[in-house]
Amino acid sequence: AALAAGRALKAAIPIAEGVDVWGPAPAPIYRLRGDARLRFLVRARRDVRLQRYLAAWLAAAPIPARVRRTVDIDPYNFL
């Protein structure tokens, strides 16, 4: 389910000037408490309205209810 959701999110990545999206990639600790984890890295210029971009992206990619997504803006570490 996680891989299918990752593919759906990748297919729905909006094209925007000043935004680069890498992924999906397996998290360094792929399985955590029995759950598979994937991650995307979004890099944007400061003048990009990133929250609006992310909201449009996540709304365009329907994922199953059993898949949970979280967004971490400026993560402390990337594990």
Image (cartoon, rainbow, N blue to C red):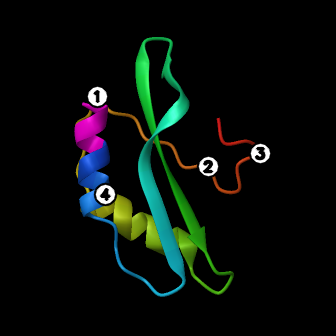
| Local SS, label 2 | loop
Q: Which span of residues is magenta-colored?
A: 1-5
Q: Residues within 10 Å of mark 2 (few under 14, many from 20)?
A: few
Vertical side of 53 occupied by 34: above or below? above
Q: Three-letter amino acid code at disc 4?
A: Lys
Disc nearest the viewer among 3 and 2: 3
- Tell me which numbered mark, 4 or 2, is placed earlier along the sequence: 4
Q: Are marks 3 and 1 in contact (CB under 8 Å)?
A: no
Q: Are marks 3 and 2 in contact (CB under 8 Å)?
A: no
Vertical side of 57 occupied by 6: above or below? above
| Local SS, label 1 | loop
Give coordinates of residue 49: x percent, y percent: 56, 80
- Image quadrant in which you'd find residue 35: top left
Question: Marks 1/4: CA distance?
Answer: 18 Å
Q: Residues within 10 Å of mark 3 (few under 14, many from 20)?
A: few
Question: Marks 4/3: CA distance?
Answer: 24 Å
Give the labeled residue for mark 1.
Answer: 66
| Label of residue 12 in the image | none
Disc nearest the viewer among 1 and 4: 4
| Local SS, label 4 | helix
Give the labeled residue for mark 2.
Answer: 72
| Label of residue 10 in the image | 4
Give coordinates of residue 5: x percent, y percent: 27, 42
Give coordinates of residue 28: x percent, y percent: 57, 31
Q: Three-letter amino acid code at disc 1?
A: Arg
